[in-house]
Amino acid sequence: MAAAMKKTAAEVVNVTFEDQQKINKLARNTSRITELKEEIGVKKKQLQNLGDAYKDIMLVDDDCLTIPYQIGDVFISHSQEETQEMLEEAKKNLQEEIDPLEARVESIQGALADLKVQFYAKFGNNINLEADDS
């Protein structure tokens, strides 16, 4: 009896063209969030590496030592102080790249939440919009 009621409830709800457009938008935004999160992860790893390099350079006792710093495919030797300044600048620039990406993810997540509310209001339990984390 319960299966029959579920089947009739599923048949009553029709997917309109507007619904399909919203479903497509949801899929695009979900994909975009995944891409952005991966990009943020890569940049945060780079930021962590820069921080580790900065800490390692601070541990060096010899102030006269020149430290190679990679720019593109070339290594350029700088003093410890200059290298630390360059690392700080690189960390600052990288953080300035990460911040708008994180803001974009939050914006898209807000739009997705609105779409999910609309879908659950229309389709109820006949739709599953939660991602599998397996």
Image (cartoon, rainbow, N blue to C red):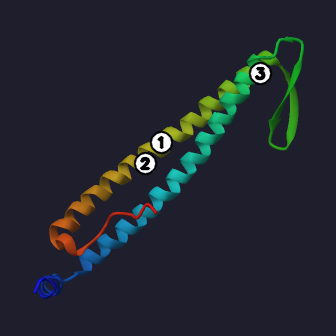
Numbered badge on residue 100: 1
Q: Is 71 drawn above or below residue 88 in the view shown?
A: below
Looking at the rendered structure, the secondary structure element under dot 1 is: helix
Task: Please state which amino acid type lies under the numbered disc 2.
Answer: Arg
Task: Please state which amino acid type lies under the numbered disc 3.
Answer: Ile
Residue extending farthest to the front is 1
Mark 1 Cα shell of 10 Å, populated few (<14), some (14-19), many (≥20): few
83 left or right of 33? right
Looking at the rendered structure, the secondary structure element under dot 2 is: helix
Please state which of residues 43 and 100 is positioned toward the viewer in this rendering: 43
- On the image, numbered disc 3 is attached to which residue? 57
Q: Quarter of the image containing the N terminus?
A: bottom left
Residue under the image location 70 percent in, 22 percent down: 55
* Residues marked 3 and 2 touching at CB (< 8 Å): no
Residue 64 quadrant = top right
* Residues marked 2 and 1 touching at CB (< 8 Å): yes
Residue under the image location 60 percent in, 43 percent down: 43
* Residues marked 3 and 1 touching at CB (< 8 Å): no
Provide residue 119's location: percent of width, then percent of height: 22, 68
Provide residue 109's location: percent of width, then percent of height: 35, 53
Mark 2 Cα shell of 10 Å, populated few (<14), some (14-19), many (≥20): some
32 left or right of 63? left
Q: Earlier in the sequence, mark 3 or mark 2?
A: 3
Task: Please state which amino acid type lies under the numbered disc 1.
Answer: Pro
Looking at the rendered structure, the secondary structure element under dot 3 is: helix
> From mark 3 to mark 1, how far is it between C-alphas?
29 Å
- On the image, numbered disc 2 is attached to which residue? 104
Q: Is 21 drawn above or below residue 112 in the view shown?
A: below
Please state which of residues 111 and 128 is positioned toward the viewer in this rendering: 128
Residue 54 quadrant = top right
Provide residue 103's location: percent of width, then percent of height: 42, 43
Residue under the image location 75 percent in, 23 percent down: 56
